[in-house]
Image (tube, rainbow, N blue to C red):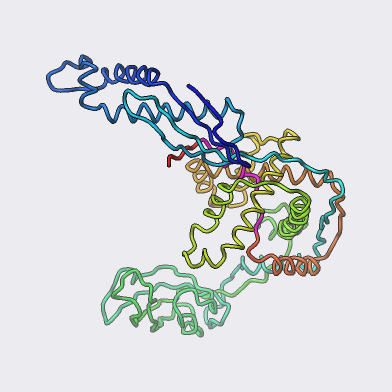
Amino acid sequence: MKIEVKSKKGLRTILSVIVDKKNIQIKMDERLKELQKEVALKGFRPGKVPPEVIKSQFGKSIYGEVVDKILRETTTKAIVEKKLKVAGQPKIDLKQFGEGKDLNYELQIDCLPSVTLKSFEKFKATHFKVKIEDKIIEEKLKEIANQNKQFEDKKENEKAINGDQVIFDYSATVDGNKFDGSEGKGVQLELGKDLFLKGFDEQLIGVKKNDIKILDAILPANHPKKELANKRAKFQCKILNVKKTKDTKMDDEFAKLMGAKDIKDLKSLIEKQISGQYSQALNSITKKEILDQIEKNHQVDLPQNLIDQEISIMTQNLKPEEKEKHRSNNEKLAKSRIKLGLLLNEYGEKNNLKVSDDEVRNEIQKQIKSMPGQEKMVLEYYQKNPSASQSLKGSIYEEKIIELIKSKINLTSKEINTKEAEKIITEFNKLNVGIDKSKTTSSVNNKSKSKKISKK
């Protein structure tokens, strides 16, 4: 195999590769011998079909298969031999091929640029710490109590009012006829929430235990049976019980019902949850402060193919006219993401940062714990989508890099209250509509390590 650098301009290198016809023939002969064990042809015993017969029948497809394998092997060897750091997918331009001929092709490679990092020590950023006021914790506690109301029986002759819970059986008809789903047993409705059918709740106001009540209601427009959509139905309801809300005491017993040790522990959990929500948004602001300074203080040549690929990913769900309308802005954002990805990757590599499989597994477990009732679904998602685990690994890697940078720069800690936090987040969101520089490292890292080859 002969490899030569045909041209080198900027980040683009074109290699000329020639594979001797003798080597191709050796590969062809090897493949024909392998196929002898597999091919079954009429008139020949299994495994005894002569290679020349196999070649006469399947020669073109075998040659194509052999050449594809040679291209994969020789492109990899050429890139390694010339010590090129590939960005994106190299392209092959076949110049000469065919049985009895040398294989001659050009390999167009866009390379990753050489990145020189400047010191981050002069960079400044603010780390916000939010103090959650007792008033907000109490409000959240009341909200939780309201979502988990306890009910107790009303006196037998007491009528139902808004906020009460009515338990009933029903039998319904449309135009005097029964239909699928026309029977219901032990239905529980909290009056005033309108969770059953529009106008249903208000017709139950005033009922008592053991009453029989006839109600009219319109079936929903999205009813599973199209012929029943928007139809007026008559419901005969047997009132089984009427309950009123029970005063909820914010005590240790209530806290235990909510999964906490006691009321103090429940308040602590609420504080952590609210604080975590603010911290997530504020950490994004701190991160952008850092990324903006890194981007501004470095000059990096960018491979055009990575820019094109990033734009393609960003706009894949847009209509052609939308792509054209936002073309300039999309290109600017794509360049920003790739530039930051290259810079952060370089910093991660220089500091030997890595993400272990255990760290990925631990992060998946965190996600599973944060979604009670959906644990199996989350686990299956990662098991069935290896790319999702790889993306998660990239996100963890990026956060490691950002945390290391934070430890090196002038990071000022500032304590704020929730009102101040909301103001900062709102102003940030207004100024950064549509701008997202996250996941920069993982996206560029994945592209730079791509092994796919495309043929012109």
Q: In screen coordinates, is 138 left or right of 177?
A: right
Whether residue 183 is in magenta: the answer is: no
How many tags in the picture?
A: 0
Residue at image location 54% in from the left, 68% down from the top = 325
In terms of depth relative to the viewer, which is nearer, 334 or 236? 334
Q: Residue furthest front?
A: 6
Residue 272 seen anywhere in this rendered image of the structure: no
In terms of depth relative to the viewer, which is nearer, 426 or 79? 79
Residue 300, percent across and down? Answer: 70, 46
In terms of depth relative to the viewer, which is nearer, 396 or 28? 28
Quadrant in which residue 252 is drawn: bottom right
* Magenta segment: 436-451
Residue at image location 50% in from the left, 40% down from the top = 383
Residue 409, percent across and down? Answer: 85, 47
Residue 187, percent across and down? Answer: 45, 69
Answer above or below: position of 138 versus 72. below
Answer above or below: position of 202 versus 335. below
Answer above or below: position of 63 versus 311. above
